[in-house]
Structures are given as structure tokens and as C-alpha cells.
């Protein structure tokens, strides 16, 4: 990683005492003035480290009872940090951080399995936290959260079949 102080970039650096080797690409997000980095290790654990602008806070395992299959994704919605991951059974889960404590892992959907090789994606738009994932059937699915409940997951329209992670932007 490298940091920018407003005028210049630092030299590239690595993390000391990383608990396990990267299995997938990391995800980074800014939340409440800090930088947060997440990664899934080769052994299926999901780790977090936070940076306050001066020092790294140290790695924490956020996996709980789950084994994570692919890259995580993180997004901020309504003053909370949301972390998304796919478990080894193909279900999309999230947990939220309110600045004080993490909630429990909870399913984003009840009936659609995520693809076996792609991470989920989320974007805040239209007053909702919108989450997208590619299903095992090649369709892109979408579910949205209003801060208290998820709407019903549904496939986006079209006959296409996809073999990659989705990406969305709100404008």
C-alpha cells in the first residue's frame, strides 16, 4: 500500500505480522475518518486492519463461524460500514459496524446462491444499500436494504449469462 498526505505519495509498504497469506484481492473503504482494509486468506478467514492516518491498528479475524470463499467487499451506508462476503456454500452475507461494534453475519438473501468464484458488490443509491452478485446460473442478482429490512432479491432483466463479478454505480 501507499498513502497520500495531500502533497505527495509515500513509498510502497507492506503489513507486518499479516496473519495469513492473501487468497483473494483485498477491499478497502474509508469510514469515519479511518481507512479499513479487508482480505480473505487462503485458509478462508476474513481479516480487517484499520489505519487512523498515523498507525495501523492490527489485524482482526472477522470470520466468526464462517469460512469465506472469495474477496470481500466493503461499503458505507447510513453512517455504518457494511462488509459483504460469500461463504463456501455460496450464500452472500453481510455484517455492519456502527463505529463501536460489529453486528452478526446475516444473509443478504434467502433463495439465490452466489456464484462460486465471484465477490459481491454494493453501492448506496436511491436511499438504499444495493447489493449485486452473480448467481451460479450466470444471472446478476440484486437486493437492496433500507436500513431495517431487505427487499426481495431478484435477477436483473436480460438473457445474458455472466462469468464475473458485477459492478454498479449510482448517479
Image: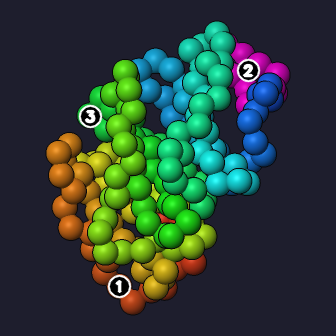
| 2 and 3 marks in contact (CB < 8 Å) | no
- Counting from the top left corner in percent of width and height, residue 1 is at 73, 31
Q: Secondary structure of the magenta portion, mostly? A: loop
Q: Earlier in the sequence, mark 2 or mark 1?
A: 2
Looking at the image, is 114 positioned above or below residue 149? Answer: below
Determine if residue 126 is in view: no
The residue indicated by pointer 2 is 9
Q: Residue at x 50, y 44 (%)?
A: 64
Q: Quadrant of residue 117?
A: bottom right
- Quadrant hosting residue 70: bottom right
Return the residue found at the far bottom.
Answer: 159
Q: Residues within 10 Å of mark 1 (few under 14, many from 20)?
A: few
Q: Earlier in the sequence, mark 1 or mark 3?
A: 3
Indicate which label's residue lies in the foreground, 1 or 3: 3
State the residue position of label 3: 78
Residue nearer the viewer, 66 or 69: 66
Question: Which residue in the protein does label 1 denote?
Answer: 158
Tags 1 and 3 in contact by the CB under 8 Å rule?
no
Query: In the rendered view, does 109 fall on the left or right side of 105?
Result: left
Residue under the image location 26 percent in, 34 percent down: 78
At a point 57% along the width and 73% down the height, the residue shown is: 116
Q: Name the spot of residue 160 as percent of width and height, x first.
A: 45, 86
Extent of the magenta region: 1-13
* Tag 2 near tag 1, CB within 8 Å: no
Residue at the front extreme, as displayed: 65
Residue 66: horizontal and vertical position, in percent? 52, 54
Residue that appears at 51% across and 20% down: 34
Task: Indicate the colouring scheme.
Answer: rainbow
Amino acid at each position: 500500500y501507499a498513502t497520500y498526505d495531500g502533497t505527495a505519495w509515500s513509498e510502497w509498504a507492506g503489513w507486518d505480522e499479516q496473519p495469513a497469506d492473501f487468497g483473494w484481492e483485498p477491499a478497502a473503504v474509508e469510514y469515519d475518518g479511518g481507512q479499513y482494509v479487508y482480505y480473505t486468506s487462503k485458509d478462508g478467514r476474513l481479516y480487517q486492519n484499520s489505519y487512523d492516518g498515523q498507525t495501523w491498528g492490527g489485524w482482526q479475524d472477522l470470520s466468526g463461524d464462517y469460512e469465506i470463499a472469495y474477496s470481500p467487499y466493503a461499503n458505507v451506508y447510513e453512517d455504518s460500514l457494511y462488509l459483504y462476503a460469500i461463504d463456501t456454500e455460496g450464500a452472500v452475507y453481510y455484517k455492519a459496524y456502527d463505529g463501536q461494534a460489529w453486528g452478526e453475519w446475516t444473509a443478504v438473501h434467502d433463495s439465490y446462491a452466489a456464484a462460486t468464484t465471484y465477490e459481491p458488490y454494493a453501492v448506496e443509491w436511491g436511499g438504499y444499500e444495493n447489493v449485486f452478485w452473480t448467481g451460479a446460473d450466470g444471472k446478476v442478482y440484486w437486493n437492496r436494504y433500507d436500513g431495517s429490512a431487505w427487499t426481495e432479491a431478484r435477477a436483473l432483466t436480460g438473457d445474458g449469462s455472466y462469468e464475473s463479478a458485477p459492478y454498479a454505480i449510482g448517479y
